[in-house]
Amino acid sequence: MASSRLKYLSLGVLVFQTTSLVLTMRYSRTLQAEGPRYLASSAVVVAEVIKILTCVLLVFKEHSDVLRQEIMHKPIETLKLAIPSGIYTLQNNLLYVALSNLDAATYQVTYQLKILTTALFSVSMLGRRLGVYQWLSLLILMGGVALVQVQYSFLSWPSEPTAAPEEDAPSAGSQFVGVAAVLVACFSSGFAGVYFEKILKESKQSVWVRNIQLGLFGLVFGLFGMVAYDGERVRESGMFQGYNTVTCSVVALQALGGLVIAAVIKYADNILKGFATSLSIILSTLISYFWLQDFDPTGVFFLGAVLVIAATFLYGYEGRPSPNPSRA
Ligand code: C5P
């Protein structure tokens, strides 16, 4: 079936995209120790522009009047996207606060709670039903990714590598602020993702039109953020200061990520997206180990990896239709 092909294709591309992004960011950390650093707020804006332009091209291929018909003439439908877009912006900023107050491992481990919040919102907002094995598999997935992340923690978009105070142990007060920020981000991640899924699955508009609507708000919020955080620096040295080839790759991969995430939410769902990104973390550690040789896994890591893989099978196990009783 075509929709089932698109489902696995989009999940596969998401695994590929997340793995490449993780590895590129890991690589850029070692490479970018010296010299001027790029502005994370500017990278967010550029990624948003690339996403919008790509979607405009995709939509234009179908028919050229669609932008006027679907976006400008339907302000209420367009305005609906301000909600997930605003929440995603809030989330990206919360994660920035979190990373400034927590070490990367604590941050990553705590952020895995979004797997559960996503499931809770999918059940309450979309009426999805999960069996006992599926809930269990989500708990195992969460634990597994957390164990993997204890060792293989990387700094996540859009925070700057300098944000994590790796030398100074964070104080109890800032730890609290950091954990609180991650916890709110977990809820916003779950809510924004599921809200976007609801919009995509309940209307006939194409995923690319929806993404343009989301991106337009994202661009406005992103520009606002860039002026608020880095206005002074942008005036001094421009918004492209510190950009190099690796930065451009990160920005391009981030833009691709937005497109793929939209496709995954449309053709698969937010819960499966969690499995795909978890598996890609394992894949990137394998590549780190065999190719980059900058990672030496421990027993805790292996346990985490086994749990993630087991959880993936367990989730799919109950998803299969039960055998036909008439043939028994
Ligand atoms: O952590 P989480 O999975 O919630 O992050 C989703 C990310 O994907 C956010 O940074 C959000 O800005 C981005 N996104 C996007 N386009 C979409 C949906 C999400 O760029 N259509």
Image (cartoon, rainbow, N blue to C red):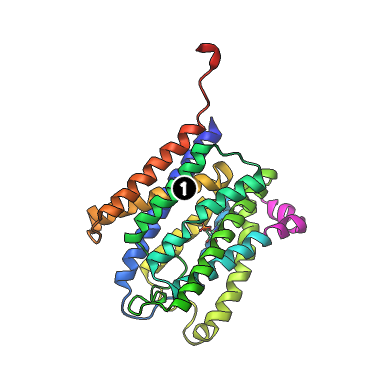
**Disc 1 marks which residue?**
139
Q: Is residue 225 above or below residue 308?
A: below
**Going 53% across and 18% down the picture, which residue do you hit?**
324
**Going 67% across and 49% down the picture, which residue do you hit?**
199
Which residue appears farthest toward the front when viewing the image?
172
Q: Quarter for ligand 1?
A: bottom right
* Three-letter amino acid code at the position of disc 1: Leu
Give the residues drawn in magenta, as a range. Answer: 60-81
Q: Is residue 64 above or below residue 40?
A: above
Q: Dot 1: what SS?
A: helix
Residue 67 in the magenta stretch? The answer is: yes
Q: In the image, residue 211 lies at what x, y percent?
A: 61, 55
Q: Is residue 1 above or below residue 135?
A: above
Q: How many marks?
A: 1
Q: In the image, residue 35 lies at what x, y percent?
A: 33, 80
Task: Depth check: give the residue in front, 210 or 191.
Answer: 191
Residue 48 in the magenta stretch? The answer is: no
Task: Depth check: give the residue in front, 304 or 154.
Answer: 304
Q: In the image, residue 277 lies at what x, y percent?
A: 44, 51
Which residue appears farthest toward the top when viewing the image?
327
Q: Is residue 140 above or below residue 44?
A: above
**Going 61% across and 75% down the picture, which residue do you hit?**
224
Position of 31 with respect to 65 (left or right) is left
Q: Is residue 230 visible?
A: yes
Task: Depth check: give the residue in front, 88 or 224.
Answer: 88
